[in-house]
Image (spheres, rainbow, N blue to C red):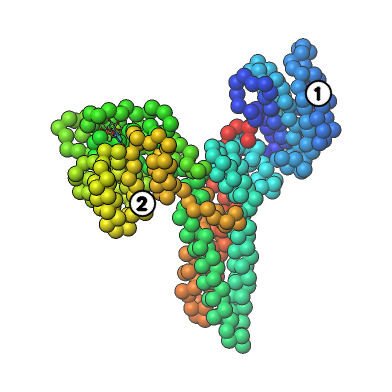
């Protein structure tokens, strides 16, 4: 895709004014870079104060320089870092001077990490984990990125590849010695091992999409009749006045979205127009969008005013609108007398399967925050994956899920083949399974895949 023999450079810190800016240089000529600024290269593994001068010999900056000798460097190549003052004029002058030198060019996005990968410093899962770490907004995302970087998926994938190699070797015996005496149970053993391997993959796939949810976040729509308190709820969860609240029915028209951190899972809450029949074209469009949101979001919180006599019917209707993941929030408890409260609670308890996913709260009369905590509890049940042991394998991308599913399907197909009559067909399925696993870690021909992964990085990474 580009010339890997070039020495590349980029600013690793964000552009703009800052105390320090780091410029990274990697490649065959990296150790020649300091001389472009009239400086010596520091001994590898050490840093030195350096007085940089420009091409005309006048002072450019006073910087800290460090050198790493390949292959024991971040990219596996010779690397020099210049920690200059974070002034736009200084960094621009350094970059200009590097760009004018022979054999040097600005790095493409993700090119440093690509070189790490090409030089065996990291596999694809590790490269993705680094990207996730840089993008992490919450603690849970950060911890997940490090778990992935530490090999939480890489390790089982390697184990499965080894198991596949053993299976293929056993199968080879079946093919090569077809007419001779083979241990009677060999075929049965191959089938059993194949099923066990497919089962191991299936149990990793059956994770409720936990890793993907933590990485990309979850969308939850707040839907319900007009005046139920959806916008009030959004504001309380956001901790600020984002949406207009009023006693007038039909206040919200457009979808208002807010992103919150719910126990480390980024959650995008969508406040929507209250659902009712209306002749107002603008409100009707809002209602249409609300219905779409209820259907298309990852989960829906059905918000209903418990002090309206028809709450139960509203709820039944709403349940058909929203997708599979839903919870119920009845509001305005402060408007209910003791008997009414008891009646509402009894009504809720009577709803099959919903009792644990429903709460009755007041969004207005909640001085101690207890009701807000109840709402959060409800939301957590909808979106936060159960805590899993640290060693659990984690799929964080659709790419992983796809590759693993393909591998598992190939094994299931192999298991359905009669090894006595068509062992070559089974061998082909094992090859397909190994190929899919190889795609996960980047151990097969994956140039196209590499381009799409590394181009999502920022320049300088
Ligand atoms: N007493 C009481 N009033 C509430 C509660 N929650 C919301 N309200 C009031 O109910 C009215 C409607 O609240 P909103 O949050 O605007 O309701 P909404 O569901 O967004 O309404 P639309 O945007 O019209 O669909 C406002 O006057 C709120 O102050 C509650 O728990 N108790
Ligand atoms: Mg509203």
| Residue at (60% x, 71% y) in the render | 168
Q: Identify the image quadrant of the C terminus.
A: top right
Q: Nearer the viewer, mark 2 or mark 1?
A: 2
Q: Does residue 422 appear left or right of residue 223 in this picture?
A: right
Q: Nearer the viewer, residue 7 or 120?
A: 120
Q: Does residue 375 appear left or right of residue 158 in this picture?
A: left
Residue 369: image quadrant is: top left
Please rate how many residues cluster around mark 2, counting C-alpha atoms within 10 Å: few if below 14, some from 14 to 19, many from 20: some
Residue matched to label 2 = 357
Which of the labelled discs sits on residue 49, or is there none?
Answer: 1
Residue 172: image quadrant is: bottom right
Kindly report the distance in space between the C-alpha atoms of the residues bearing marks 2 and 1: 62 Å
| Residue at (59% x, 67% y) in the render | 164
Kind of element beneath mark 1:
strand
In the picture shown, does residue 396 fall above or below 42? below
Please rate how many residues cluster around mark 1, counting C-alpha atoms within 10 Å: few if below 14, some from 14 to 19, many from 20: some
Q: Position of residue 86 (x, y in %)?
A: 67, 20
Figure quadrant, ligand 2:
top left
Q: Nearer the viewer, residue 374 or 181?
A: 374
């Amino acid at each position: 895709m580009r010339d890997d023999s070039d020495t590349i450079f980029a600013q690793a810190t964000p552009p703009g004014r800052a105390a320090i800016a780091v410029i990274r240089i990697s490649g065959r000529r990296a150790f020649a870079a300091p001389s472009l600024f009239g400086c010596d290269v520091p001994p590898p593994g050490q840093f030195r104060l350096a007085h940089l001068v420009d091409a005309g010999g006048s002072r450019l900056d006073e910087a800290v320089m460090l050198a790493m000798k390949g292959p024991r460097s971040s990219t596996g190549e010779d690397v020099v870092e210049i920690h200059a003052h974070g002034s736009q004029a200084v960094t621009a002058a350094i970059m200009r001077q590097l760009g004018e030198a022979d054999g040097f060019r600005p790095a493409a996005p993700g090119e440093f990490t690509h070189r790490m990968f090409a030089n065996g410093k990291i596999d694809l899962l590790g490269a993705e984990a680094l990207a996730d770490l840089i993008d992490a907004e919450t603690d849970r995302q950060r911890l997940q990125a490090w778990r992935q970087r530490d090999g939480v998926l890489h390790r089982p994938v390697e184990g499965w590849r080894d198991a596949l190699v053993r299976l293929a070797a056993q199968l080879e015996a079946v093919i090569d010695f077809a007419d001779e005496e083979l241990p009677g149970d060999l075929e049965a053993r191959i089938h059993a091992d194949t099923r066990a391997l497919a089962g191991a993959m299936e149990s990793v796939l059956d994770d409720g999409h936990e890793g993907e949810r933590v990485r990309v976040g979850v969308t939850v729509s707040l839907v319900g009749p007009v005046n139920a308190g959806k916008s009030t709820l959004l504001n309380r969860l956001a901790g600020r006045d984002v949406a207009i609240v009023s006693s007038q029915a039909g206040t919200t028209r457009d979808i208002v979205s807010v992103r919150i951190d719910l126990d480390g899972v980024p959650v995008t809450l969508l406040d929507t127009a209250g659902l009712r029949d209306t002749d107002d074209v603008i409100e009707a469009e809002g209602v249409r969008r609300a219905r779409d949101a209820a259907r298309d979001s990852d989960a829906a919180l059905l918000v209903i005013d418990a002090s309206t006599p028809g709450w139960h019917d509203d709820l039944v209707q709403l349940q058909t609108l929203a997708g599979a993941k839903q919870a119920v929030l009845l509001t305005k408890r402060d408007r209910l007398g003791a008997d009414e409260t008891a009646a509402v609670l009894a009504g809720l308890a009577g709803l099959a399967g919903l009792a644990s996913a429903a709460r009755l709260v007041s969004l207005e009369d909640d001085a101690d925050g207890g009701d807000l905590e109840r709402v959060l509890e409800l939301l957590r049940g909808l979106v936060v994956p159960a805590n899993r042991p640290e060693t659990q394998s984690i799929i964080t991308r659709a790419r992983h899920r796809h590759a693993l599913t393909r591998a598992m399907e190939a094994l299931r197909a192999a298991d359905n083949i009669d090894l006595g009559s068509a062992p070559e067909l089974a061998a082909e399925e094992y090859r397909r399974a190994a190929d899919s696993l190889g795609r996960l870690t980047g151990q097969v021909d994956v140039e196209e895949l590499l381009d799409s992964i590394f181009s999502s990085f920022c320049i300088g990474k």
